[in-house]
Image (spheres, rainbow, N blue to C red):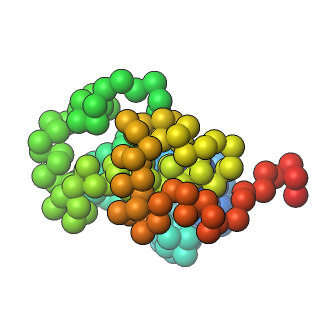
């Protein structure tokens, strides 16, 4: 059985949700971004209640509403789209292809449920991706702009500053350099 999970955006989330399943007595769960797969036999009402508690303590929740499931799938598709340099579709075509839902309907539902447009969510995710790339200290701002899908450094800088209040250069000066795990 597939259990959709709200709030998962990265591999750390996958690890945290896997831990929640293990603490809830569901150790055989296979967790991926946005969902977990478990055997139907292990889903007693008590196990689900404990799972809900464990997920909530980590900032996640099970999704049962079909519209909420669609929104969560859309968010994950947007994150994948932002981080996929080889995707040559525009976002609306990518979402329609990935989700099999009319973009106009999805856009209306997303805005109504999330209080912001799909485009604003995409911009926020692109800026988060740029912040992540900058924090690694391996790329200059121009390379980050290119990798994050911006047409220019100026475009990245405008969106970055509107979201964070800082330019990418100021962000670099105000954050400590990420230390790779092999240097710890």
Residue placed most toward the observer, 11 or 31? 11
Q: Hey, which quadrant is residue 138 in on the image?
A: top right
Rendered image quadrant of residue 93: top left
| Residue 31 seen anywhere in this rendered image of the structure | no
Q: Position of residue 177 (x, y in %)?
A: 72, 59
Seen in the image, is 134 located left or right of residue 160? Answer: right
Q: Which residue corresponds to the image point at 67% horizontal and 50% vertical from the top-left?
A: 136
Q: Is residue 65 left or right of residue 52?
A: left
Residue 14 versus residue 165 in the image, above or below: above
Q: Give 25 or 154, whichever is nearer the viewer.
A: 154
- Residue in the picture at 32% in, 59% down: 64
Q: How many marks?
A: 0
Q: Residue at x 44, y 44 (%)?
A: 153
Task: Residue 36 in the image: state x and y as whole percent.
Answer: 51, 49
**Residue 80 or 1: which is nearer the viewer?**
80
Coordinates of residue 54 in the picture (x, y in percent): 56, 71
Q: Residue 72, position in %: x, y?
A: 35, 52
Which corner quadrant holds the C terminus?
bottom right
* Residue 139, placed above or below residue 128: above
Rendered view: 96 above or below 105: above
Q: Quadrant of the N terminus?
A: top left
Locate residue 158: give its quadrant. bottom left
> Which residue occupies the foreground of this view, 74 or 166?
166
Tell me if residue 57 can be seen.
yes
């Amino acid at each position: 059985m597939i259990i959709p999970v709200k709030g998962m955006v990265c591999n750390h989330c996958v690890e945290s949700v896997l831990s929640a399943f293990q603490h809830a007595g569901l150790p055989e769960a296979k967790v991926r971004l946005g969902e977990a797969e478990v055997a139907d036999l292990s889903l007693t009402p008590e196990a689900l209640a404990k799972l809900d508690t464990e997920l909530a303590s980590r900032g996640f929740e099970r999704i049962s509403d079909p519209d909420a499931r669609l929104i969560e799938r859309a968010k994950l598709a947007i994150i994948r789209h932002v981080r996929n340099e080889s995707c040559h579709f525009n976002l609306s075509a990518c979402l329609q292809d990935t989700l099999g839902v009319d973009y106009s309907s999805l856009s209306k539902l997303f805005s109504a449920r999330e209080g912001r447009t799909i485009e604003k969510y995409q911009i926020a995710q692109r800026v988060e991706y740029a912040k992540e790339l900058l924090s690694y200290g391996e790329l200059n701002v121009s390379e980050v702009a290119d990798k994050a899908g911006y047409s220019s450094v100026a475009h990245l800088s405008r969106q970055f500053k509107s979201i964070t209040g800082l330019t990418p250069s100021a962000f670099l000066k105000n954050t400590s350099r990420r230390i790779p795990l092999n240097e710890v």
